[in-house]
Amino acid sequence: MDKNQLAVKEMQEGDLEAAAKLLNEAIEENPQDPVAYTNFGNLLAAVKEEDKALRFFNKAIALDGETAAAHYGKGNIFFNQDDFDKAIDAYQTALAQGLQQADVYYMLGFSYYQKGDMSRALPSLQRSAELNPEDVDALFYYALTLAQLELVDQAVEAFEDVLKVDPHHADSFFNLGVAYAYKEQGEKAIEMFDKALAIQPDHVLSHNGKRQIEEQLKQ
């Protein structure tokens, strides 16, 4: 195991000081190695030293523009800074350089989602959910995006997929309630709101949704 691999292991185990020491040594021994700069960027990002992290990611990219993990690291920093356009560019570059992983697709789709561009968010979130069908966040935001695009029947299926992975996902029950209300299935909507409230009794949106449907059913 080389120093880069050892450093990643130390980071995973939470010993950032040991990881930093190993990465410093790796860079001193091989200052042309983009991997060491990328790993140091990840370490700095983990401790919220984002400006310094960007410098290390940019150094890695200057040494080798095809360092996909450095582009992904840059994307995460831009995302955290709410600069979604730059994040999208970085994630797309990471994908183009071969880092076609569920997390990259998720962050790309979620960046579009944050911009309100649902039609562009959809394929990336769908791909993320396909690559990692156990990722509750990817499944949930894929379902929400379908709902935002008024693809209601597909959204219902997707929220049900979330609940297969996490049967206590109150927000999915709430959104199923909204979907059934949209489909004018009031009793079914109330059933879903009740399930959300059984999991999270202070789920305000479910209380409101249930009350509105009950008032409609009385009329």
Image (spheres, rainbow, N blue to C red):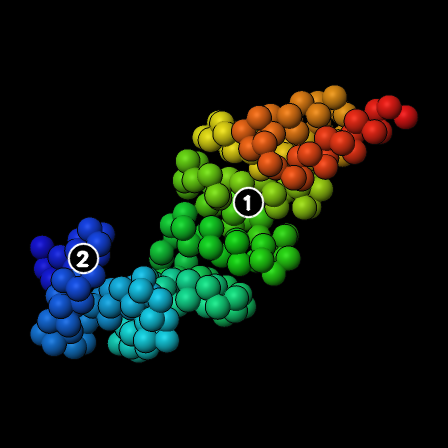
Number of numbered discs visible in the structure rendering: 2
Question: Which residue corresponds to mark 1?
Answer: 141
- The amino acid beneath tag 1 is Tyr
Quick check: 61 left or right of 170?
left
Question: What's the residue at 29%, 68% (across, down)?
Answer: 44
Q: CA distance from mark 2 to mark 1?
A: 33 Å
Whole-percent x, y for residue 8 in the image: 20, 57
Quadrant of the rendered structure where residue 26 is? Answer: bottom left
Report the quarter where the C terminus lies: top right
- The amino acid beneath tag 2 is Asp
Q: Tell me if residue 153 can be seen.
A: no
Question: What's the residue at 63%, 52% (across, down)?
Answer: 118
Question: What's the residue at 52%, 43% (across, down)?
Answer: 126
Label of residue 15 in the image: 2
In the image, residue 1 sits, relative to residue 178, either above or below, namely below
Q: Nearer the viewer, residue 121 or 20?
A: 20
Q: Residue furthest right?
A: 219
**Disc 2, SS:** loop
Q: Nearer the viewer, residue 125 or 180?
A: 180
Report the quarter where the N terminus lies: bottom left
**Disc 1, SS:** helix
Of labels 2 and 1, earlier in sequence is 2
Question: What's the residue at 45%, 30% (across, down)?
Answer: 165
Q: Are marks 2 and 1 in contact (CB under 8 Å)?
A: no
